[in-house]
Every structure is written in C-alpha cells, then in structure tokens.
Amino acid sequence: MKEVAIEKKKPLLVMFTSNNCTFCRKMISDTYSNQQVKELLRGRTESVMAHSDHYASLIKKLGIRGYPSSLLISPEGEVLDFMEGYV
C-alpha cells in the first residue's frame, strides 16, 4: 500500500490494531464502515490496517502506546496526523 500511496501521491491512513482490542473492532465496524467516512476517504487516501503482531518494531519506533491508533502519513513519509484511541 505504501508504494501505491507514493505512486498516486495520496496520504496513507494506517490503523494499528491488536488482538482482543474491543475498541479496534468497534472502530472497524462503526467508523470505517460508516458510509460518510467511506466517502470522505475514497479517492483521497490509501488505507491499510497494521496488526501489532506483524509490526512490533514499527509500533515501537512510532511510540504507539495504545490501540486503536491511526496515522495519516504523507506520500513523502511525514506523519500528518496521529489519532490514539477510538474515533
């Protein structure tokens, strides 16, 4: 996805999640499944989920302390926004 975001010059929205995270499941089912949110993101960002088991070193590097956490990253790799917790 990172390569697609760079190629299309769109920000990358990454949601970090973990096992047994009630609010992660709620955010997926309520927030990201909401039609208005889908329309807002469609065509403007590339979105991906990153599970804590697979991205432990990146999570540590970014200083993520809780889940869900979402980062909006520019095509150049700059963190534009960081949202910790259920949104």
Image (cartoon, helix red, strand yellow):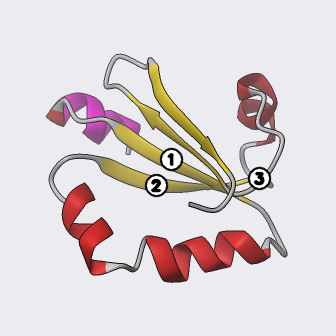
Residue 45, magenta (yes or no): no
**Type of residue at label 3?**
Ser
Q: Position of residue 48 (x, y in %)?
A: 46, 54
Image side of residue 50 versus residue 23, left or right: left
Q: Which residue is mark 2?
A: 48
Q: Quadrant of residue 32?
A: bottom left
User: Residue drawn 75% across and 55% down?
Assistant: 67
Q: Nearer the viewer, residue 53 or 76?
A: 76
Q: Determine the CA span between mark 3 and mark 2.
A: 13 Å
Q: Earlier in the sequence, mark 2 or mark 1?
A: 1
Measure the C-alpha gap from mark 2 to mark 1: 5 Å
Q: In the figure, 35 relative to 56: above or below?
A: below
Can you tell which quarter of the image residue 72 is in? Answer: top left
Q: Nearer the viewer, mark 1 or mark 3?
A: 1
Which region of the structure is painted magenta? 2-7
Is most of the magenta stretch helix, strand or loop?
Answer: helix
Q: Residue at x 67, y 69 (%)?
A: 24
Using the rendered view, name the quadrant where residue 12 is placed.
Answer: top left
| Image coords of residue 51 (percent x, y) | 69, 57
| Residue type highlighted by circle 2 | Val
Quick one: quadrant of the C terminus? bottom right
Q: Mark 1 = which residue?
A: 14
Q: Residue at 42% across / 45% down in the picture?
A: 13
Q: Which residue is mark 3?
A: 52
Q: Tags 3 and 2 in contact by the CB under 8 Å rule?
A: no
Q: Position of residue 79 (x, y in %)?
A: 49, 23
Viewer-closest of 83 and 20: 83
Residue under the point 16% across and 36% down: 8
- Is the Cβ of the residue at disc 2 closer than 8 Å to that at disc 1? yes
Say which mark, if any, is on residue 39: none
